[in-house]
Image: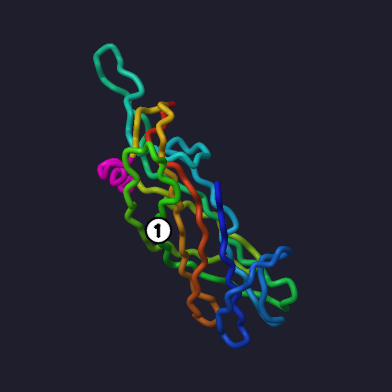
Amino acid sequence: MKKWFVVFCIVSAVGILFGCETNPDDNCGGLDDIVSCVSVSNIAPSDSNGAASTNVDAVRDICSTDSSGTPTLEPFTDHNAAITLTNAQFTTASDSFDVEVHHYSITYTLINCPAAATGCPPLTGVEGERTFVIPKGGQVTATFPLVPLAVKQEYASEGGEVGASGSGAPFPIYTATYVFTATTEPFSTEIEISGSQDFTIGNFDNCP
């Protein structure tokens, strides 16, 4: 699955945000002063069972039925992702500083709609508030939704291809793009950090 990351460098001498060129060696750039380079360094999706997966289940299936006819349903929750944000000092800088994240948004882009799919509807983006500090020279891993339950239900209700669980139906692929809004601690300068994750959505078997 494709992942891409955008790195921003914050130069404290003048309190100005500089967007960095991607560098093969350190994925950053900036001025030789006090510089923090903040990036999304990893996105690890997990399904409703907590297992690592980029297959998003959009339909809740019946796993089994007991002798009285009572069904056991498969787990059906947000499809989440553990996202790691890293605050690294630029290689030639003399120091760096803390950055505080306070807001996030997710937008969805369709990147592959199979010809045989019955539908590949647009998905409504989401946003929320989350406050935590990424310390200088450190990183923070926090759980965010990749595809919330409401977006799964939207996909199914808007005619997205679901097929039968385990059928190998031609499910579409989307990209979720995260944008984190943060503030540099010393200067209250607002910055944005972004990263993305591809996922397939349809009817997958998550029965235990």
Q: Is residue 176 left or right of residue 96?
A: left
Q: Nearer the viewer, residue 18 or 182?
A: 18
> At x 58% / y 75%, what residue is drawn?
19
Left or right, 75 with reference to 92: left
Total number of numbered discs in the rendering: 1
The stretch drawn in magenta includes residue 155: yes
Q: Position of residue 58 (x, y in %)?
A: 35, 39
Direction front: furthest residue: 115
Residue found at the far bottom of this picture = 14
Secondary structure of the residue carrying tag 1 is strand
Find residue 57 and report its image quarter: top left
Provide the residue span drawn in magenta.
149-160
Q: Which residue is mark 1?
A: 107
Q: Quadrant of residue 41?
A: bottom right
Residue 143 lies, in percent from the top left, at 48, 51
Residue 25 vs 54, above or below: the answer is below
The structure residue drawn at horizontal position 40% and vertical position 55%, both measured from the top left corner, is 108
In front of the other: 83 or 121 = 121
Q: Residues within 10 Å of mark 1 (few under 14, many from 20)?
A: some
